[in-house]
Image (cartoon, rainbow, N blue to C red):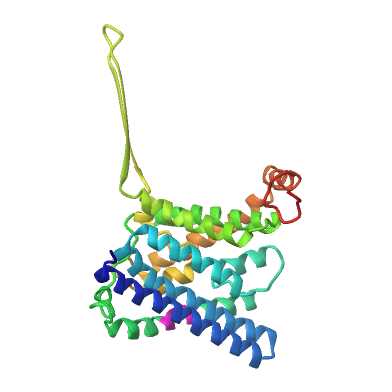
């Protein structure tokens, strides 16, 4: 039997996400048809993409808090596929422009302008989200529009920056590999990896692995080892955003960290991880693996291979 109390708020959240995606899609089409200068068009597309990303993620927080991780994962997976198929050259992520600079594909002026456009879209969209939440159509939105927010950073700044950097590095390595390998379902695979990395930390955030070893075989010596590991705590520690604009839109100015601490963790940490991924990907061992994988035939998902 359908639980109307639970189902109605989920429908409200779903409709908000659909509305946000539809408005962004229409804005994107309007820009593509009316703006002729390519770079100006790209700047506007970056702003739209960032607004869409942050607007949807504001509501995804509501989904995760009220309907569980599984529902959140389904929504996030579907959205990442949608974004991959519709954003075109826009990324809504500043460190991708830094990667382009390192690889000689862009210049500093354009990188800064793209970042400015993304920040503008990501910050302005909260007014739109706030307006929707203020309507309090569902119980999950009650007092949400004007409530105080708290930072996700629960550890020293350096540790939080390392967490964001490592996770970002892994994400970028996976994306680069998929781009070069060109698998048949690259978009879905990339979306699955990104979703899994986020959800894995959430699923294991309260789990603790304990290992105990004791040895009393020797007459005069007793050895005891106790090891306790908190699994998934990285996502409790920093939030696991992997995108500076997204983190700024959702958490900048929240109680629990200063703006400088926020910048160090979510901007410098994530960007450092992205830069490291560029150089790691060029390592002979990784390149050998990527090239070796593309030479494998059989029942594969690779686009240029016959099953």
Residue sitting at the far top: 219
Q: Is residue 4 above or below residue 240?
A: below
State the residue in front, 196 or 6.
6
Residue under the image location 49 percent in, 63 percent down? 77
- Tell me if 284 is positioned left or right of 9 in this view: right
Residue 40 visible in the current orientation: yes
- Number of numbered discs overlaid on the protein picture: 0
Q: Is residue 28 above or below residue 207?
A: below
State the residue in front, 45 or 79.
79
Percent position of residue 265, x then y: 43, 61
Residue under the image location 33 percent in, 71 percent down? 10
Q: Is residue 129 above or below residue 294?
A: below
- Tell me if 110 is positioned left or right of 4 in this view: right
Percent position of residue 240, x then y: 42, 59
Tell me if residue 188 is in the magenta stretch. no
Q: Main secondary structure of the magenta part?
A: helix
Percent position of residue 12, x then y: 34, 77
Tell me if residue 122 is in the magenta stretch. yes
Q: Quadrant of the N terminus?
A: bottom left
| Res 286 quadrant in image | top right
Residue 156 visible in the current orientation: no
Percent position of residue 213, x then y: 32, 23
Residue sitting at the far bottom: 34
Residue under the image location 69 percent in, 45 percent down? 299
| Res 231 quadrant in image | top left
The magenta region covers 120-125
| Res 285 quadrant in image | top right
């Amino acid at each position: 039997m359908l639980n109307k109390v639970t189902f109605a708020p989920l429908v409200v959240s779903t409709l908000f996400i659909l509305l946000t995606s539809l408005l962004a899609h229409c804005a994107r089409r309007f820009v593509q048809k009316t703006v002729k200068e390519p770079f100006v068009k790209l700047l506007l597309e970056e702003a739209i993409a960032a607004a869409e990303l942050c607007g949807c993620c504001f509501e995804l927080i509501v989904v995760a808090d009220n309907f569980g991780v599984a529902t959140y994962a389904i929504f996030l997976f579907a959205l990442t596929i949608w974004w991959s198929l519709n954003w075109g050259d826009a990324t809504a992520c500043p460190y991708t422009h830094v990667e382009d600079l390192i690889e000689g594909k862009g210049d500093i002026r354009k990188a800064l302008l793209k970042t400015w456009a993304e920040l503008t879209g990501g910050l302005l969209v909260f007014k739109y989200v706030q307006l929707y939440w203020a309507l309090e159509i569902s119980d999950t939105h009650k007092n949400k529009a004007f409530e105080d927010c708290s930072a996700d950073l629960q550890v020293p700044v350096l540790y939080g920056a390392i967490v964001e950097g490592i996770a970002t590095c892994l994400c970028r390595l996976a994306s680069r590999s998929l781009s070069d390998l060109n698998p048949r379902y690259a978009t879905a695979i990339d979306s699955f990896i990104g979703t899994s990395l986020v959800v894995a930390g959430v699923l294991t955030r309260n789990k603790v692995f304990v290992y105990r070893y004791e040895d009393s075989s020797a007459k005069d010596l007793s050895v005891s080892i106790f090891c306790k590991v908190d699994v998934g705590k990285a996502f409790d520690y920093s939030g696991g955003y992997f995108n500076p604009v997204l983190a700024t839109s959702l958490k900048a100015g929240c109680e629990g960290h200063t703006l400088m601490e926020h910048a160090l963790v979510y901007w410098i940490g994530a960007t450092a991880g992205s830069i490291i991924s560029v150089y790691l990907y060029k390592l002979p061992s990784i390149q050998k693996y990527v090239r070796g994988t593309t030479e494998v035939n059989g029942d594969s998902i690779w686009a240029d291979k016959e099953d």
